[in-house]
Structures are given as structure tokens and as C-alpha cells.
Amino acid sequence: MRPLRLLFETQEAAREVAFMLRCEYDGCNMITLPPVHDILSLRTAIELTGSDFCFDGDHYPLVLPLSNEELSPLSEEQLVERISRKAELWCSEVPF
């Protein structure tokens, strides 16, 4: 198994998740988790920061499923638009 690298929407989110999980932070928006890591801790840390993320090498963000309370105020069209805008931001900020 190889280490898992995640790219976050912001530097602050990456720094906070790296601090919470005691893993490697690159000083920008990427963290590196050891090959064996706690999935529940990772999910909790990501939820606490409220940030989107993607795996290193991907070109689109992953979003943790929202709770029913968070979903109700937004229509499906609004959710699609929100995700599209975030994807555009990621493509413009993440160097290839």
C-alpha cells in the first residue's frame, strides 16, 4: 500500500486536518496520510473543517454526503451549480 495524498480546497483546511490527524502537511493544500490510517478520524476531520477535497491526481473535488438538514434548503439545480463552481475554482488553482 502507498501513502494517501489529499488536496483540500484551502490551505487552512489542509493544515487543520493534518494537525488533527498528525500527518504530513506540504505547506500548501496537500496532506499525506500513512498507508494505514483511520477512515473515521479522516472523515470527522474533514467534516469539522467543512472543506471539499480530492485525491492527488484527480481533477474534480469530492464532497462528503450532506446531512438531510443541509440538503433541504438547496434544490438539486443549486447543488449542481455549487459543485460546478467549486470544480472550476479547483481547476484554476491546482497546478497540473
Image (cartoon, rainbow, N blue to C red):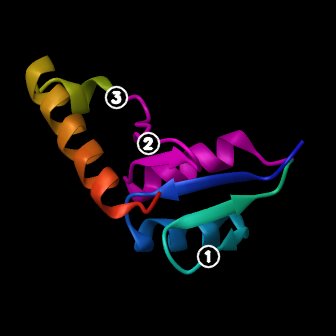
* 3 with respect to 29 (left or right): right
**Residue 48 image offset from top left, x and y in percent:** 45, 55
Q: Give the range drawn in magenta.
A: 36-65
Q: Mark 1 points at which residue?
A: 26
Q: Position of residue 20 (x, y in %)?
A: 63, 67
Relative to 88, 4 lies left or right? right
Mark 2 neighbour density, 10 Å: few (under 14) some (14–19) many (20 or more): some
Residue marked by disc 3: 67
Residue 75 visible (yes or no): no
Q: Establish if 28 lies above or below 46.
A: below
Mark 1 vs mark 2, CA separation in Å: 19 Å
- As drawn, the label of residue 50 is none
Q: How far apart are marks 3 and 1 (CA)?
A: 31 Å
Q: Examine the rendered structure and indicate whether residue 9 appears above or below residue 65.
A: below
Q: What element carries label 1?
A: loop
Amino acid of disc 2: His
Count of picture labels? 3
- Callout in the foreground (1, 2): 2
Secondary structure beneath dot 2 equals: loop
Q: Residue furthest front?
A: 96
Compared across the picture, whether 58 is left or right of 84 comes to right
**Residue 42: x %, y % from top left:** 63, 49
Specify which label sits upstream in the sequence, 3 or 2: 2
Residue at left 43%, top 72%?
11
Circle 2 residue: 59
Residue at the spot 59% in from the left edge and 50% down from the top edge: 56
Amino acid type indicated by mark 1 = Asp
Task: Please state if 10 lies on the left or on the right of 88 as rendered.
Answer: right
How far apart, in angstroms, are the residues tagged by discs 3 and 2?
A: 25 Å
Mark 3, mark 2: which one is toward the viewer? 2
Q: Is residue 61 magenta?
A: yes
Q: Is mark 3 on a helix, strand or loop?
A: loop
